[in-house]
Amino acid sequence: MNLSYWEQKSYLSNIDYTIVGSGIVGLNCALQLRRRFPKANIIILEKGVLPQGASTKNAGFACFGSLSEILDDLKSHAEEEVVSLIQKRRSGLELLRQNLSDSAIGYKQYGGYELFGRNDVEGFHHCISQMGKVNSLLKPYFKGDVFEVKDNPFHFKNIQHHLSFTPFEGQLDTGKMMRSLTDLVLRKGVLILNSVAVESFEEWNDSVHIKTNHFEFTSKRMLICTNGFASKLIDVEVKPARAQVLITKPIRNLKIKGTFHLDEGYYYFRNIDNRILLGGGRNLDFKTEETTEMGETELIQNKLKFLLKSTILPQTPFTIDHSWSGIMGVGSTKTPIVKQLSSQVFCGVRLGGMGIAIGSHVGKELADLVN
């Protein structure tokens, strides 16, 4: 693209900070940079027409981890690490709500439930038996018991008779959240350029030369916030993980209200606009779902529909309205990678499927690294 004098002068000259990715992390990074450097020239490059990863495609769970997920994390992480991660998720949610307001993001704290399959007797009893241990571990930070046992008030079928419940979990409207966050960043004077993909970059003495699919320019610093796509630009331990989602058409007199986890969080569903939104299933085919390609597979979509019929809405007629997918970033640990890669390049990636919860915290932490 042969840029005009005006385009070069007003859009791509004297750039202080270039953020790659306009998702939750990138936008929060821009907000914190603006707070720290009120006069800085900040630009965000987004390869999609809309944010390309998972920020506008997720299920809208304002959560910090179900009981079985936390117990599973304790098998491979030290207690201090698990607690620290949960604290970061909670502080990220608090920061998101403070920045935007609950009404702006459609936040509702209906609580979160975990279902255990009818054949998962061992898993159910293990979680219930360890509930006291987890509550003791988290009580100093929540100022109360995080998890309790509840009956099945929603008439779910083919599950254990009791559910794990936490009153601290909420849900939000992902579309409202991202529109509100984008509007706030724009009001702060940050430029967002969509459909601009960074193809490569080269570090010079005191700047970064960035090549995109449309133009080349220089920036004093570059901050990479592309999560599941990060390994295409930098050498980091992040694998893409596609998450498939579907949503029903409105259901009259829908009684289900809350956020729900099943099978260690590999399946998740919630109510929204008198509909049921259901996602997950990548554990059915990890290899195929380790991709940056959007799309749905028959294997996973059929499993999601089966769960709706057999477990979630066994006595309620429903019609699937729409399905889609998003790309998460995962790794051998759930701890995000927030670090300085060189004197001019930084990254905040690998959110482990917890972008809504931890994204705001990671964006702020990333911005606080730069000078």
Image (cartoon, rainbow, N blue to C red):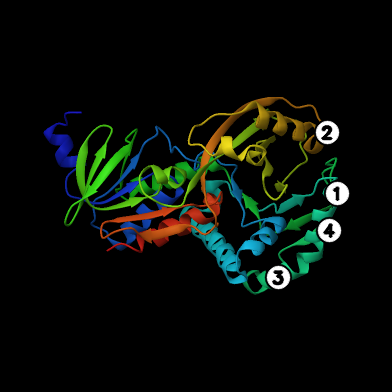
How many angstroms separate mark 2 from mark 4 (CA)? 25 Å
How many angstroms separate mark 3 from mark 2 (CA)? 35 Å
Q: Do the residues labelled 3 and 2 touch (CB within 8 Å)?
A: no
Residue 314, label in figure: 2
| Residue occupying image coordinates x 33% and y 52% | 223
| Residue occupying image coordinates x 42% and y 52% | 236
Q: Where is residue 272 in the image (x, y as percent from the top left)?
A: 65, 39
Residue 160, label in figure: 1
How many angstroms separate mark 3 from mark 4 (CA)? 22 Å
Q: In which quarter of the image is residue 210?
A: top left
Which mark is first along the chain, 2 or 1? 1
Residue hosting label 4 = 125
Which mark is first along the chain, 3 or 1? 3
For numbered disc 1, what is the local secondary structure? loop
Q: Position of residue 275 (x, y in %)?
A: 69, 34
Q: Do the residues labelled 3 and 4 touch (CB within 8 Å)?
A: no
